[in-house]
């Protein structure tokens, strides 16, 4: 869609092709020849990921949203906006600066240097993150095993880049999978083998079969990616017994677990189940964290806990976090100190507990999830073939319908019905799972008001009713 | 050094291995078995880049600096710190917010969303960057061809990731090369073929020979990386004739030029030579920009201008910037909006001209370069075998000596003489250039006071004098 909508090369503004005069710069003679007009590159000559559905999903979904700005969006998994205050930003900077001064003994010059200058590759809020993990998740880690990253996305890229040592390495991932994980794997040429999720959040028999099958084929499964709490996109969570069995299997079969936990704090009324990392006795779990939903996305601050030990060629032993840090030094150098300072300020203002800081947000998400589930029940009776799940937390509900949900249907929904949602096929990897035939859609209820939610559900109901009638 | 200094696995604090209790989380039964102690991973099982000198150079140099904090540093290529003001940060945020409101017509809600929420992958300061390029560099580009990145480092990774379509693709780079370029190439498995720099900044005969030799060997040179203005580490610049000839060669031999320009504004008394991009008639140049030296490093904001057209498999035509944006969406998702807002605020406060905003900094760097060159001349007479170049701008001066400058010498210099600098061998790629035998060191004069500079030069002189005496 993006490429088709762009003007052809001939129509590009001439100003973009010719140099303009500038004061203080020696002028260049005009060339005699007319500039050759041609296309410069071809996608066939670029990295194969650029033609991969994983890298085009996000683009496509954003473009549909941009093209129909008046549609009600039940598509975007964005955090609730109403409680954010612009005035808080300078205050967070000041709070973090005071922390550097009063708690860490920085001079004024050192504070300024920490905020403005190049800094520590693994980050400057690592101690605050460690305290946060201990308070909110019961995870006790050495701050040195934390790498603060440009959002959780960079953390995934660091880990996958490190683990891909050669063409035999593969990654396992619970399917359906967050598309950002698949995209990160594409960037480092790491194949992703899907593992059935099912009602337990992971099908351990299928996981074992996939691991053994991959080994029999000469491949090496390095890790399995899971989102045990209120997964994106499925909304499904794993219970404690499943988590314990998963940890055992990872140990027995010798692979790592990549635990991604962006939604854990947004549980419903039930008690929280401990994270895999909190249950991890043997450093099997690499833990991926995000402040996008608990602080704000515009800071782009996430992190990875990588407390695994790594033996070097010379027999020396270090931390996996330090290997990831080397990669980060060549990817983004540092996570912006100013963005870390804002997240650090928010952490400090809430005694490093984001569970406490997000009480209102948790209530909003619980209210909205309840409204989606109740709203669907009110619109589709027990006789209807339409089904949905009832997640215990998070941002998402999955609706299953008796017809194929493809991108054309989404476009029709946006254009003719004024409602956006996400076709579930985007979360299944190409080919393997038969994404062509996926009959489900994801509803996000995190960023809408109750009124928008009702309008969105009404419109979705009209679309589904029309589709059911047409299929009859 | 980092790995050797870490405690062995047995000594890791037990707290880091065992879960701690947490309120509101269901407790897990204690396991009967004692946790197994072993190392979890081995560098042999990780991506080969992690054992590569390019990824270990930065670490080694940082560790020497951290280990000798009292040494005078002529090593760090960091911008001058004295003019930075913490109070400017909230003001930049306010200035950028006002711009969104008054110039772009955002409502208060939209301003908040732009700063706090997920945003446009290609960035939110692209129009300001385009204006800046027109004012300061005479480069006229469509803002849509700009991707705002997490520092210039991410821009390099995006471009190299895109251009590496398969194992036959290679990159050319003027040698000695900025180590961040080599590191980025390692992360995407793209081999780098060195091209002689020499006094002209690039040896065009060698470039042609390397391109043709690579093709004869079945390889495909995709691009040549250059830093035409006051290069890091050499300090050398290309004149207009060399730039024009380089553009012609790139067109005739059909490869791209990656122009990196972090120091262009810090020229001396001479007039500036136009950038390659300003002379680029046929979209041969991908331009890499950085605000680390002209605004502040702690924002980590850079950008790439990629106005090349790209033909898709379906015949549609798009911009190279949009392909890079797809990769960015899976690498960092967005450049932090808050960091962009601070850079945007500074740009707005100076009418988008950073040349004007950096008048004082330019004077500091010119003064320091003059002091280094004059200080070396005062200490090493015409009879001395010690030589140095006289760069017309930038942060660096290269000193040539008649003995090998290795890492052991740097450590001795830090420990026994109290002065840090950078062995030039770190900027030569492994093996190919015989980095073992490099007899030169780089002095950075960007972040020191005149007094520190004099002390540093005195100490360096003692080191060199002792080495010369020992060699006799």
Image (tube, coloured by chain):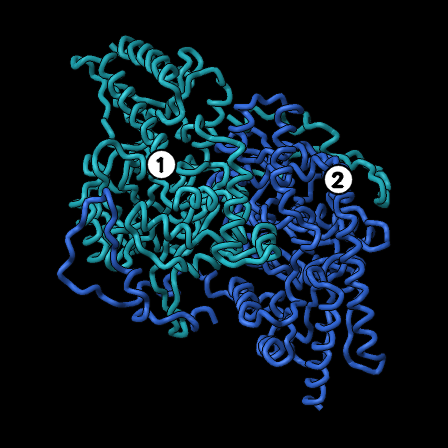
Chain colours: A cyan, B blue
Q: Is residue B194 left or right of residue A290?
A: right
Counting from the top left corner in percent of width and height, residue B274 is at 79, 46
Q: Quadrant of the C terminus of chain A?
A: top left
- In this view, the residue in front, B176 or B204, is B176
Q: What is the C-alpha distance between the residues marked 2 and 1?
A: 47 Å
Find residue A80 and report its horizontal and vertical position in percent: 41, 28
Name the residue rendered at 44%, 13% in the picture. A415
Q: Secondary structure at mark 1?
A: loop
User: Mark 2 = which residue?
Assistant: B353
User: On the image, which quarter does residue A465 sit in?
Assistant: top left
Image coordinates for residue B383, horizontal then vertical, percent: 84, 83
Image quadrant assignment for residue B319: top right
Seen in the picture, residue B208 relative to B22 is either above or below; the reply is: below
Report x, y in % for residue B134.
Answer: 75, 37
Give the answer, above or below, for where A385 lies relative to A445.
above
- Both labels 2 and 1 in a single chain: no
Dot 1 corresponds to which residue?
A430
Q: Name the residue at 35% across, 30% down.
A: A360
Kindly give the residue lying farthest to the left in the view shown: B32
Seen from the viewer's position, the closer of residues A420 and A54 is A420
The circle drawn on residue B177 is none
Residue A33 against residue A105 in the figure, above or below: above
Give the quadrant of residue B367. Answer: bottom right
Q: From what the image shows, is residue B194 above or below residue B342?
A: below
Q: Answer left or right for A87 relative to B226.
A: left
Q: Is residue A54 left or right of residue B372?
A: left
Q: Secondary structure at mark 2?
A: loop
Viewer can see residue A333:
yes
């Amino acid at each position: 869609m993006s490429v088709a909508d762009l003007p052809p090369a001939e129509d590009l503004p001439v100003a973009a092709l010719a140099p303009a005069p500038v004061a203080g710069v020696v002028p260049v003679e005009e060339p005699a020849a007319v500039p050759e007009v041609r296309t410069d590159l071809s996608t066939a000559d670029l990295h194969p990921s650029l033609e991969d559905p994983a890298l085009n999903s996000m683009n496509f979904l954003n473009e549909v949203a941009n093209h129909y700005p008046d549609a009600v969006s039940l598509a975007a998994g964005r955090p609730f906006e109403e409680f954010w205050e612009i005035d808080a930003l300078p205050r967070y900077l000041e709070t973090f600066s005071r922390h550097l001064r009063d708690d860490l003994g920085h001079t004024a010059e050192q504070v300024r240097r920490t905020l403005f200058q190049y800094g520590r590759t693994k980050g400057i809020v690592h101690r605050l993150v460690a305290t946060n993990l201990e308070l909110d998740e019961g995870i006790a880690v050495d701050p040195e095993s934390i790498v603060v990253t440009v959002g959780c996305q960079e953390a995934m890229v660091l880990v996958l880049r490190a683990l891909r040592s050669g063409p035999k390495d593969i990654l396992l991932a619970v399917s359906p999978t967050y598309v950002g994980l698949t995209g990160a794997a594409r960037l480092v040429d790491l194949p992703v083998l899907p593992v059935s999720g099912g009602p337990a959040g992971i099908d351990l028999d299928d996981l074992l079969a996939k691991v053994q099958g991959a080994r029999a084929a000469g491949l090496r499964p390095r890790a399995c990616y899971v989102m045990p709490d209120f997964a994106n996109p499925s909304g499904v969570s794993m219970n404690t017994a499943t988590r314990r069995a998963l940890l055992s299997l990872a140990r027995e079969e010798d692979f790592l677990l990549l635990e991604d936990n962006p939604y854990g704090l947004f549980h419903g009324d039930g008690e929280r189940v401990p994270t895999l990392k909190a249950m991890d006795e043997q450093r099997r779990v690499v833990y991926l964290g995000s402040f996008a939903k608990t602080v704000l996305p515009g800071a782009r601050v996430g992190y990875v806990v990588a407390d695994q030990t790594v033996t070097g060629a010379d027999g020396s032993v270090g931390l996996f976090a330090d290997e990831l840090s080397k990669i980060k030094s060549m990817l983004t150098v540092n996570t912006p100190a100013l963005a870390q300072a804002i997240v650090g300020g928010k952490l400090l203002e809430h005694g490093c507990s984001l569970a406490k800081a997000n009480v209102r947000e948790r209530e909003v998400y619980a209210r909205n999830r309840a409204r989606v589930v109740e709203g669907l029940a009110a619109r589709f009776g027990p006789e209807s073939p339409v089904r949905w799940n009832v997640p215990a937390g998070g941002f998402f509900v999955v609706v299953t319908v008796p017809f194929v949900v493809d991108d054309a249907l989404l476009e029709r929904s946006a254009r003719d019905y004024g409602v956006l949602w996400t076709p579930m096929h985007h979360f299944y990897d190409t080919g393997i799972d038969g994404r062509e035939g996926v009959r489900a859609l994801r509803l996000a209820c995190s960023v809408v008001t109750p009124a928008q939610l009702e309008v969105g559900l009404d419109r979705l109901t009209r679309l589904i009713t029309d589709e059911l009638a047409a299929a009859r």
